[in-house]
Image (cartoon, grey):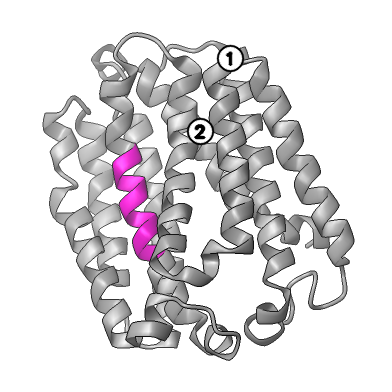
Amino acid sequence: MNAFLRLVRIHNVIGASLGAFTGYVVSSMWKFNLLEIVEAIVVVALVSAGGYAINDVYDVEIDKINKPDRPIPSGSVSVGTATALSYALMGLGTVIAIFQGLYEFLVALLTSVALVIYARDLKKTGLYGNLIVASTTALSLFYGGLSYHSGFWIQRIWIPVLYTFLLTLAREIIKGVEDYRGDMAHGVRTLATTNGIARAWQIARITLLITEVTSPAPLILGFNILYGVLLIPFLYVTSRALVSQTSEEGASKARSYLKVSAFLGMVAFALGSLPIQFLI
């Protein structure tokens, strides 16, 4: 894959874009304004791509241990180029958000600032950094809803936003287990390095259990039967992550499962928002 696409983690950018799409259709119940939804997807894609790039800039020394094949430690992309690209992407996304409205601009700007602060400082603080990542990921869906910004959009969007936050929080804690050795070598304070791998896994599993146990609730909060159908594979894959081995290797597998869980969850919420006339 092209080094720049790997730098911005293009698969994660696509996931964030899907989040914006999901947030829009959940809020609007599939009432489309093509310009609004395209702008939302583009803004989220640009800001998230910039965030991933700046994360690699500040992670270069750690990645030399954990992920030496990443574009910067491998020499495919220089630190200066990655930094310039990161700020350019986030800046462009924020500028485009201006044309959507004041609230959209503020969310894009604050998210960009949060991503930089996270990469530079908060990533090394453990749980606080995990909370920032979970929040900014959930904001991808929120931004999609904000772009629609009409009717009862808040009452609908908070549900997928909350589940995205919980699922991402668990995944970030597990990622800390996966990166345990490199983080220990560079004094990064994650739940795994400060409390041990077993304790970090325990907290992640509790978070996943809360997500799974409460996941049928949207069926009584206005989402249709398609949500329930897709909930079955979601629960299966998430459970596979839940029972993964309590180790660095198990964390790597669990994080892969949770990426699938996130995709299934967004599709479930998107299709679960289809008005009943589309299902007859």
Point out the frontmost of discs 2 and 1: 1
Q: Quadrant of the N terminus?
A: bottom right
Q: Is residue 238 above or below residue 188?
A: above
Q: Is residue 205 above or below residue 118?
A: below
| Most foreground residue, 264 or 153 | 153
- Can residue 246 be seen here? The reply is no
The residue located at (19%, 47%) in the rendering is 215
Q: Is residue 78 above or below residue 231?
A: below
Q: Position of residue 92 (x, y in %)?
A: 76, 32
Snapshot quadrant of residue 158: top left
Counting residues from the start of the chain, the first of labels 2 and 1 encountered is 2
Mark 2, residue position = 20
Q: Position of residue 220 (x, y in %)?
A: 11, 31
- Can residue 96 be seen here? The reply is yes
Magenta span dominant secondary structure: helix
Identify which amino acid the numbered label 2 is placed on. Ala
Kindly state the secondary structure of the residue where label 2 is placed.
helix
Decide: few, some or many residues near mark 2? Use Cα within 10 Å; few <14, some 14-19, many ≥20: many
Point out which mark residue 10 bears.
none
Snapshot quadrant of residue 168: bottom left
Q: Is residue 168 one of those drawn in magenta?
A: yes
Kindly state the secondary structure of the residue where label 1 is placed.
loop
Q: Position of residue 276 (x, y in %)?
A: 24, 16
The residue located at (62%, 42%) in the rendering is 112
The residue located at (57%, 17%) in the rendering is 102
Q: Position of residue 65 (x, y in %)?
A: 66, 87
Q: Is residue 212 left or right of residue 99?
A: left
Range drawn in magenta: 161-171
Mark 1, residue position = 101
